[in-house]
Amino acid sequence: GTGDFTVHEKLDNGKLKEVSKASGGAFGGINVDKRLFHFFSKLFGEEAFTQLKSEEICDYLDIFRDFEIKKRTVTDDCEKNYVIRLPSSLLQFASNNNPGFRKNAESTDFKGHVNFWHDKLKIDSTLMKSLFTESIQNITTHIEGILQGFPKVRQILLVGGYGECIILQDDIRKCFPQQDLIIPQECELAVVKGAVLFGHDSKVIFERILRYSYGTNSHSKFDPSVHCEDRKYVDDYGITRCRGSFYTLVKAGEKITSKGHIISSAIFALSKNQSEIEYKIFYTEKTNTIYLDDDCKFLGKLIIPLTGDKDTNRKCNVSFTFGLTEICCKVTEKSSGRDIEAKFEMLE
């Protein structure tokens, strides 16, 4: 559903160095499918097409499987019609809700672009190509913005299922004639194969740039010059803190080598009755976040059991390692120096 972009520099030793953090937006191949869904909903009636999805899911999926094959053959200069076979269930649902739906197509925005023939729908090239317009424009505009910051880029590598669409390939070549467009064989599988190769040798990417800032649900000491007054409270140990503050571990845009980057953070009990600390981890694209409700998204949490005297401010040290194939974590109780087994849950 998304188009994801990054810029790499190839080093003399053959390894890769990421010089621009991953970026992108919701303009992947699925957005072409959404345009088709919108087109079918207007043509057959939204109620009929929704009914098809809820009652005859196999027929619904068959339409999009057929379209998936055909959309990869669409080109800028092609003038042929594209034929999509319609399941009898869809025709029946449409007839029940609107008996004249075939004739009504002539009075819609698609007049002259579609034609019913028995159980088939013919779509002309103009309408078919229009399904790609918004997605491709967003992609080429995004690439143009990246290249303005990195004028030395000489090659564009296109991977993923959407990369097999000829019309997308053609438009990228037209928009960026100074760059060589590389499309590997079976580019739909390239991402999967790359993940397998990366799993065998994670150091092939020598350096990367973090796309997100990562942080925790910190209850920082209250700072009147930074925090809002309505977030102030006093914990059981008499310390004035800020409720719902975000403590940044690493910031978006930071460079991380394949050896990993260790960040340590102290955490503590806020109540004398606590038997464990729930240490939540969040991420955001911003670099100067102060509060959790400022576009932060939940990633997971650590459940840390507590021991020791409840009358003392019980503290633990948490160290995170970023830059590896996963985020590693180690928790140490300060009072005893012993390591604590912490459970990292990816879902709430």
Image (tube, rainbow, N blue to C red):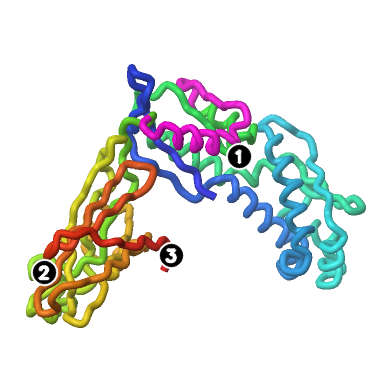
Q: What stretch is highlighted in magenta?
A: 176-203
Element type where label 3 sits in the image: loop
State which mark lies toward you, 2 or 3. 3
Indicate which disc residue 347 carries. 3
Q: Is residue 83 magenta?
A: no
Near mark 1 (Cα within 10 A), the count class, few <14, some 14-19 or many ≥20, is: some
Which residue lies under the disc numbered 1? 161
Callout 1 amino acid: Gly
Which quadrant would residue 145 be assigned to in this image?
A: top left
Q: In this view, does 23 lie above or below 216?
A: above
Indicate which disc residue 221 carries. 2
Distance in Å between CA atoms under marks 1 and 2: 49 Å
Which quadrant would residue 37 be assigned to in this image?
A: bottom right
State which mark lies toward you, 3 or 1. 3
Callout 3 amino acid: Leu
Camera-nearest residue between 278 and 24: 278
Q: Please report whichever mark, 2 or 3, sits nearer to the chain's N-terminal start.
A: 2
- Tell me: 104 left or right of 219: right
Residue drawn 37% across and 60% down? 299
- Tell me: 176 left or right of 184: left
Location of the C terminus by quadrant is bottom left
Of all residues, the one furthest to the top in this rendering is 12
